[in-house]
């Protein structure tokens, strides 16, 4: 479980299957490399990510996000209807959720990749 809080709401990132993790990592890698190597600001590099990539990442990851209500966690996304289960989730909340997902999926991928690269050199 990876929990994070946005505007006094606690969210949890559940299990994202391996294929979707790989998909997300592949979509996000060009953005991360552009940001790290081009001298662009984070905002400039992020603005260049195609909208289709953002949508695809969110569609893969949103079903794994739950929000706490009382002691239990409930899904925030209805995949069949293509809509949020909570009407108080705003654009900035979605951005924060998006970056929580990226951190959850991509950080371990890059950590493992860089460790393997240093072992083989």
Image (cartoon, grey):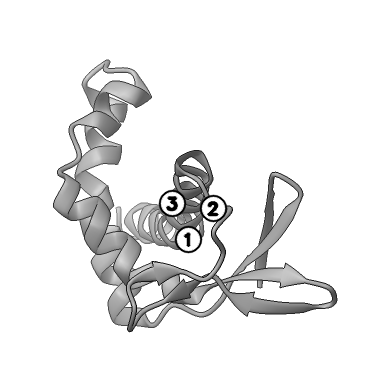
Front of the two marks 3 and 1: 3
What residue is rendered at 24% in x and 30% in y?
A: 47
Q: Secondary structure at mark 1?
A: helix
Name the foreground residue: 1 vs 71: 71
Which is more N-terminal, label 2 or label 1? 2
What residue is rendered at 40% in x and 61% in y?
A: 109
Residue position for label 3: 98
Relative image position of residue 59 (x, y in whole percent): 31, 68
**Label for residue 118?**
none
What residue is rendered at 45% in x and 42% in y?
A: 91
The answer to whether marks 3 and 1 mark residues whose Cβ atoms lie closer than 8 Å is no
Q: Is residue 89 above or below residue 75?
A: above
Q: CA distance from mark 1 to mark 2?
A: 27 Å
The answer to whether marks 2 and 3 mark residues whose Cβ atoms lie closer than 8 Å is no
Residue position for label 2: 89
Q: CA distance from mark 3 to mark 1?
A: 16 Å
Which is more N-terminal, label 1 or label 3? 3
Residue position for label 1: 108
């Amino acid at each position: 479980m990876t929990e994070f809080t946005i505007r006094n709401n606690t969210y949890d990132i559940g299990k994202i299957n391996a294929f979707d993790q790989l998909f997300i990592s592949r979509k996000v890698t060009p953005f991360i490399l552009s940001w790290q190597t081009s001298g662009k600001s984070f905002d400039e590099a992020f603005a260049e990510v195609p909208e289709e990539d953002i949508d695809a990442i969110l569609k893969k990851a949103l079903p794994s996000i739950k929000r706490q209500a009382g002691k239990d966690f409930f899904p925030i996304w209805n995949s069949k209807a293509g809509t949020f289960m909570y009407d108080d989730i705003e654009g900035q909340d979605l951005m924060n959720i998006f970056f929580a997902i990226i951190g959850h999926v991509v950080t371990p991928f890059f950590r493992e990749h860089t460790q393997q690269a240093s072992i083989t050199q």
